[in-house]
Image: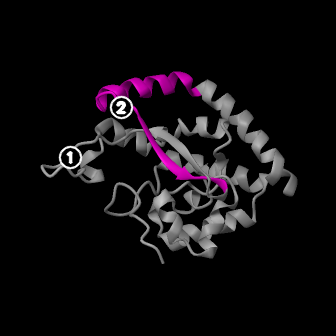
Amino acid sequence: MQLYRNFLKRVFDFIVSLIAFGLLLPLFILVTALLYLANQGSPFFVQPRPGKNGRIFKLVKFKTMNDKKDAAGNLLSDAERLTAIGGFIRKTSLDEIPQLINVIKGEMSLIGPRPLLVEYLPLYNDMQRRRHEVRPGITGWAQVNGRNAIGWQRKFELDVWYVDHVSFTLDCKIAFFTIMKVVKSEGVSQTGHVTMTKFQGN
């Protein structure tokens, strides 16, 4: 398990991501063009996120929400800013494709705890902070066990469980169930929310 965790996992990540990005390149170009039009020139969402050992990197996703604001200059709610094409892209998880670039660069893994917001770092307790012992992933154990439809405490428990049980077999299992979740569009958001509600600390 240690050989896979410390070496082979990164090798598989690089090779599979490189091949996948090559195969998905036509779709990547098409979605980029459609979002360029829908978002008035902004097809990508780029945001700093903590990676392995809390090291900050820039996560790249397709941008599914516009930047419309209210009269006071505040961004509208996620539900109000989600575009029609953005909703479809989010539902089918196509918004995750650009993260293959993060995996190729070694900032992320295909499988691992999802990279959360930098502002959450000081809010974690010792157990929750352990999710940063491995590279964050495009999908993970928490995603196939509820995705955004589960609460924060359960999500962190699943993330840390993954950290303690990393293996090739487990990663294959997560990859398979991820495909099933995407096909069924399960757990994309919490009830009443377009995205996961913010973590407020313990």
Residue type for callout 1 = Lys
Which residue is rendered at x = 51% and y = 57% of the image?
Answer: 116
The disc at residue 182 is none
Magenta highlight range = 24-52
Q: Residue furthest bottom?
A: 202
Between 70 and 99, the one nearer to me in the picture: 70
In the rendered image, the vertical position of residue 137 relative to residue 102, given as above or below:
below
Q: Are marks 2 and 1 in contact (CB under 8 Å)?
A: no
Residue 18: image x %, image y %? 68, 30
Between 184 and 190, the one nearer to me in the picture: 190
Which residue is rendered at x = 19% and y = 49% of the image?
Answer: 73
The disc at residue 69 is 1
In the rendered image, the vertical position of residue 159 relative to residue 18, given as above or below:
below
Give the distance between the C-alpha atoms of the residues marked 2 and 1, in whole angstroms. 16 Å
Residue 74 falls inside the magenta stretch: no
Residue 103: image x %, image y %? 64, 40
Residue 141: image x %, image y %? 62, 59
In the rendered image, the vertical position of residue 129 relative to residue 24, given as above or below:
below
Residue type for callout 2 = Ser
Q: Which type of secondary structure does the marked residue at label 2 adopt?
A: loop
Q: Earlier in the sequence, mark 2 or mark 1?
A: 2
Between 43 and 46, the one nearer to me in the picture: 46
Q: Residue furthest left?
A: 71
Q: Residues within 10 Å of mark 1 (few under 14, many from 20)?
A: few
Q: Which type of secondary structure does the marked residue at label 1 adopt?
A: loop
Question: In the image, 85: left or right of 120?
Answer: left
Q: Quadrant of the N terminus?
A: bottom right
Q: Residues within 10 Å of mark 2 (few under 14, many from 20)?
A: some
Which residue is rendered at x = 73% and y = 56% of the image?
Answer: 170
How many numbered dots are placed on residues in this image?
2
Q: Which residue is mark 2?
A: 42
Q: Quadrant of residue 101?
A: top right
